[in-house]
Every structure is written in structure tokens, then in C-alpha cells.
Image: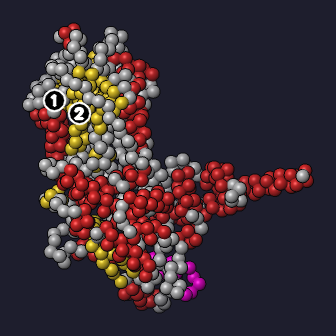
Amino acid sequence: MVLLMERFPRRFKVAVATVNNWSLDFEGNFGRILKTCQEAFDQGASIRLGPELEIPGYGCADHFFELDTELHSWEILGELVQESKKLKDLLIVTGMPVRHEGLLYSCMVSLINGKLVFIRPKISLKNDGLHRETRYFAPWNERKGVVQFELPQIFGFEQETVPFGNGILVSGDGIHIGFETDEDAWTRDLPDNEQSLSSYADIVLNSSASFHVMGESRRRLNKIVTTASAVLKSVYLYSNHRGCDGERLYYDGMSSIAQNGDIYAQIPQFDIEDTAVATAVVDLGPSKNSEQSRFTEIGSEECLLAREALPTSEPILVEPMKDVEELCNGPPAWLWHYLRRSGKSGFFLPLSGGKDSAAVSVMVRLMCDKVVKAVEDHKDSDDPAYYLEGKKVNCSARELCSKLLFTCYMGTENSSILTKSMSAGLAGDIGATHSIAVMNGVVNAYLNLCNSVHNYVPSFSRNDPREGLACQNIQARSRMVAAYLLAQNAILSSGREGTLLVLGTTNLDESLIGYLTKYDCSSADINPIGSLNKVDLKRFLAYVIDNFDFPHLKQVYETRSSAELCPLKDGKIAQDDEEELGLTYEELSVFGRLRRPDSKGPFAMFLVLVPLWHPKMSHEEIANKVITFYERYIDNRHKTTVLTPSYRATVYANDNHRSDHRPFLYPDFNYQYTKIRKLAKQLAEKESAKENLMTIYL
């Protein structure tokens, strides 16, 4: 058979699937997996590749410790094996945890025509950033070894064993199929792995679980997909998840088919549909010589090559998005998936008239734009992503925004007419349902409470900074309580069912140095901008101003940032964020990136900043900037322990839940500060001596 097929073009159609699966939603996950298998089959594909751990969901976290997760995964696999009998000659590659000899592995499971043909465990585990794979899984150390795995018989399998390990699957018509699971592709610099795959695999399948980080998608596309297909000299299939599977992450799809460095098919990065399938017809060319392969070959009787002449697909041009374009798509898509799966009816947003809350409101409107466009572009589709509360979206983006986004300006006597006007104007631009809450009565009630207990009313007029801070904080904390009260009742008055999610608006710079009140409006249900610094947020706003029709956003963008918690002067804003901090937001963005991901402490940070900022700043000024940053950081780190879960968009995020593990009770850094000041003084003296010498010489 193989010799006969060599006389004809070795062509066949392959498919990659993207599924918006949800951790532990076994029934829903099975439905989405089966739907993509059926679509691949209907389109004539011979291989359907799904993402990593798609059966239970990649984000199960500590649920991977539970035997229930393994049990239900096997149950779903058993159902999928039975369903595969109806999808004749379609090789289905799915993902689930498999325990072998007491150790749990993340595995790619291959099945066809009602039987399992190969289980391939992951070799290289991800253990950086948000990844904790070694917490749950073991790496397969027998790099080229294959063993016989005894299948549990209670799930209806019609076989007793299946090959398990690192090998190459060979179809009945001689196609050599190699496997990689996500991180395996990043560590392919292992000489024997690369040599073997490139020499002996006609096609390489990569099941991945990659989430969106600004700019990461471009690296993923170049490194994994195009480069891999060129280096391995093979057809390369890459499958990734999509959506929010129950955590802070957003999986951004981009499942791709590539060959020799070219992309032949790709699922768009930020589409909202629950399922998507991309196919391409590829020509494998001559068979690769497998006689010297150091991989174990697993033979399969089923043939995959097309039985008729098929025209090969043409390469396509894929233009990766810019960072700001990703922000216009990623957080809005995440908001939609979170809203649908939370079962809530919309969002409540305290809209202050500042840049941060403006950015969040715009993201909600862009979410509405994205949903409405998807529905209009796929009028014949009934994808579940087009439905909210059991009803299909059938209105304009502006109308949808008015139904889903409720904004409120929570003003006090320290709020300005300017921000009140900008808040209302922007809400009108995007179509939000806007209201105004006067908070003076609530604030005064708390101040009177203090008077009844301590016999005095805190005031800004006295010199003790503790009183002024108390006056600021009670304004902020009152807004948090009011936000939840209003969110729970916003749609009650109109007779609608449900309640609203409260959106947070704290940016990364504020949380990094604690320039926020603990349990104020930073405390919410979710926050789409919590991992973004002010510089990136301003870039996002500038892009939106240039590309969308929200006229009042420009005024918001151009107004200096202020918390508006201190008394006005002549009716105008007197409080200025950067003046109060002693640091600019541009400087904070530098500090934030040096701290993470560059892992610089105070002294190392000073060493890096001297050549960057001197002579524009003196050595002493640079030292003082570093010390100011770290004094604020160590005093306020405790606030990160209660930060609202935020969309994880950057590598410099400070969320201590998963990615930024540090103490929240710090000592003073006197030792570090002394070293910095001493070195700054030495550098200044050395510079002064050099200048004096130059003067004498001249």
C-alpha cells in the first residue's frame, strides 16, 4: 500500500481546532470537542488536532490533585472513542491527564475509528510566570521510550492496552506523525529531539495552552509555528485554546497550519465563538527515511492520505496585531466570556472622569462592538457565544452597551465640575446608562460616627496628615459600598432579572506603590486593566481616540490625573497624582519593568538607572527616586493581597495570586538605601573631580 501511494502526490486535508473550553465543565467541553471533530470530518479532514488538556480544561489548577478530574476525563474520553466510530478515518488528537505508575502526565491522546492508537505524555513542563505544571504533572523522562499502557476497562474501551510514551505514529499509508505539547516546542534546542523530528516526521502536531500577553502572540507565531515548520521541514499543526476558562487568563487561539515557514490556515486571535476549525490541504512530498529513526514507531492500520486528487492550499499572509490593537481586542473578549459564564446581566462601573475608568468603559463598548460584528458576520450561526441570558444578541453595539453597562459618577464636595462633565460626556459617547450619585451625605455620616466615638471630626484643615488621609479614605471606601448597592439594584427598577458585575479600575502603577485606598473602588469583581501601567493605558487611549468616535475621550486623555479626594481650590482640581507621588508615571513604568520581569532589587535598580537617567538627573536625584519608589512599595505591598482579579495582559503584572510571589510585610530597606546613597555620593564626587581636572587642563 505504501509503495503504491508513493506513486501519487502525498496530499491530505488536516484540521486544527480552537475550543472555548471551561475548566471542569466536562459536559460542555465534550460538546465543543465533538462539534469540532464533526466539522473537521464534514470538511474532509484526516486529522483533527485539539489544544492541551482540552477535556478537563487547562486551568483546573489544584483540581488536578483530585481523582475526580481524572475519572471524569476518562469518562469523556470513553464517549469520544465511541463517537469516533461515526467519523470514519478521522484521527482525533485530544488532551487529558493520564496517570502512569503513580505519576500524572499531561497527555496528547490519539484515537481513530473507535480505538486508541497512542498516548503521548508531555516532556518539557512550563514552570514560569503563571505556570505551575510541575506542581501537578511529571515530565516523561524516557525521551524515546514507549511502553504499553493498560487501559481501565470500566470506560468501555474495546482494547486492553495502548502505546504510551515518546514515539512517532505511522499511518497505514506511511505518514510519520510527530508530537509536541506546548513547551516541548520552546525547548526544541535539544539536539536529539530536533534532529529526530526533522529527519523522520512528515507532520508535527503541537497541542498548546498559551494565553494572551501583549506581544507574546507575535513571538509565538514566529518561534513556534513558522520557524518550527521551517526548521523541522514538516507540516506543522498548532492548536490553542480560546477564551476565559475560569481564571485571570485569556487564551487567544491562533491555531495554525504551517509548512516550510509559511502559514496555510489560521484561526483569528480574538474571535469570540465557542468553537472554530481551520483546514488546509497539504502536500507532504517524498517519504522521509525512517530506517535510522531513534524514535519508536507506533503503527496504525488506518490510512490518512486523500484517495482523490486534491489541490493544495495556498499560503496566507498573517499580520500580527500591534500591542494597542491587542488591548482593543483581548480584554473586551475576556469581559464577554466572563460575563456569559458568570450568569450576570451586565456591568456596573464607577466612572470618575479619569483615564483609568475611561479605559475600562471603552473596553466594554469595544466588547459590544466585537459581539455585534460577530453576530452580523455569521448570521446563519447559532454559536453559544452570540447569546446572553438565553437570548441571541440582536441590536446595535450602542444599544447593547446601554443594556449591559451602567456607569455612575460618585461625586463628593471635592469632585470637580470638569470630571463630572467628562464622565457624563464619555458615557453618552459609548452609549452607557449613566447616573450621578452625590456621596456627601454618606461621607458626613461616617465622619459624624467618628465624632460620636472619638469626640472629634477628622478634617483637612488640621496639620496631622492622619486626619487628611482618613478624610480621603472614607470618600473612597464609601464608593465601594455604594457601587455594590447600586449594582445589585440598577436593573431591578426596570423589571429586568439578574444583577451586575462591578468593574474595578485600578492600574498596575497604583497597586504597585499603593496609590489607592484598600477596599475602595479598586475592590470589585473583575478588573480588565489591573496588569497595565499608566503608560500602556495612555497608548491605548490615544489609539482609541484616533480610531473610534468617542469625542469626550480626548478631553479625558489630556487632563492631568487626580484622585480628587482633597478640597478644591477656587472650584478647580488641586490634587495631582504625580506631584503627590514624587514620581512620574513614565518613571513608574520603568521601575515596574525593572522590578518584574527583570528582577532588580533597589541597589541593582539604581545601577541600571544611572546610565539611563544621568546626566539628565543627578546621581542623588536618581537615588532618591529609587528610594521613594521602594518606600512606597514596601509600605503598601499588603494591598496587593486583596487586589481584584484582573486580566493578565503583561509580563510586568504584580498580582501576587500566581505571578508575583513576595512578602506583604517588609522590613525597612535601610541597608539597601545606605548602599545606594553611598554609591550616589561616590559617583557625584568622582564626576566633580573629573570636571575640576578638565577645568584645570583647559
Horizontal and vertical percent for residue 348? 29, 69
Q: How many marks?
A: 2
Which element is circle 2 on? strand
Q: Which residue is mark 2?
A: 279
Q: Is residue 453 visible?
A: no
At 30% from the left edge and 78% from the top edge, which residue is drawn? 435
**Horizontal relation, residue 203 to residue 85: left or right:** right
Q: Which residues are magenta?
A: 461-473
Asked if the magenta segment contains residue 470, the reply would be yes
In the structure shown, which secondary structural element does the residue marked by tag 1 occupy?
loop
Question: Could you say which is closer to the camera, residue 224 or residue 296?
Answer: 224
- Residue 308: tell me if it is visible: yes
Residue type at mark 1 is Gly
At a point 61% along the width and 63% down the height, the residue shown is: 628
Q: Residue at x 30, y 14 (%)?
A: 286
Q: CA distance from mark 2 to mark 1?
A: 9 Å
Location of mark 1 (residue):
44
Please state if 229 lies on the left or on the right of 588 as rendered: left
**Residue closest to the eye, 308 or 102:** 308
Residue 555 location in percent, x, y?
44, 71
Quadrant of the rendered structure where residue 55 is?
top left
Quadrant location of residue 126? Answer: top left
Q: Residues within 10 Å of mark 1 (few under 14, many from 20)?
A: some
The image position of residue 365, as x and y in percent, is 30, 62
Measured as percent of width and height from the top left, residue 9 is found at: 23, 16
